[in-house]
Image (cartoon, rainbow, N blue to C red):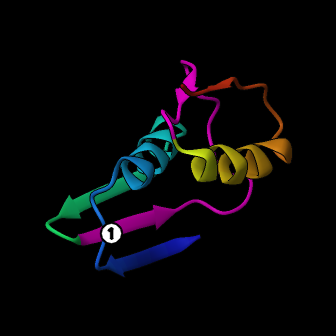
Amino acid sequence: SGTSLIKGFLESEDCLATMRSFQDMGIDIKRKGNLLKVEGKGLYGLKNPQKTLNVGNSGTSMRLTAGILAGQDFDSVLTGD
């Protein structure tokens, strides 16, 4: 948990898909240009998303998000194209 500042954020579809997925799970992410401010909630601070998490064409987002979700105490659905 805590605040992380990420400089040099790349506005690619993969990065945006990952960002949206975590926002859908209750993570507060503020973006200003290529700077992100992420308010972490700890390993078990994620919330059950109210919709299917769509990672688009991002295989990396799918793999990383699936790994994190595997340890959560809620069911979720990931999809992509």
Relative height, residue 71 to residue 78 (above, below): below
Question: Quadrant location of the C terminus?
Answer: top right
Residue situated in front as seen by the camera: 22 or 26: 22
Q: Circle 1 sits on which residue?
A: 37
Amino acid at the residue labelled 1 = Lys
Q: Quadrant of residue 39?
A: bottom left
Q: How many marks?
A: 1
Q: Quadrant of residue 69?
A: top right
Secondary structure, mark 1, is: strand
User: How far across and how far down the image is residue 32, in percent?
Assistant: 15, 65
User: How far across and how far down the image is residue 38, in percent?
Assistant: 40, 65
Few, some or many C-alpha atoms within 10 Å of disc 1 (few <14, some 14-19, many ≥20)? some
At x 53% / y 44%, what residue is drawn? 58
Position of residue 17 in the picture relative to residue 72 (left or right): left
At x 74% / y 43%, what residue is drawn? 66
Say whether residue 11 is magenta: no
Question: Quadrant location of the N terminus?
Answer: bottom right
Say whether residue 47 is magenta: yes
Relative height, residue 76 to residue 57 (above, below): above
Residue situated in front as seen by the camera: 54 or 58: 58
At x 51% / y 46%, what residue is drawn? 22
Relative height, residue 51 to residue 22 (above, below): above
Spot the residue most to the top: 51
Q: Where does the magenta region start and end?
A: 35-57
Spot the residue most to the left: 33
Q: Quadrant of residue 51?
A: top right
Please tell me whether the stretch drawn in magenta is mainly helix, strand or loop.
loop
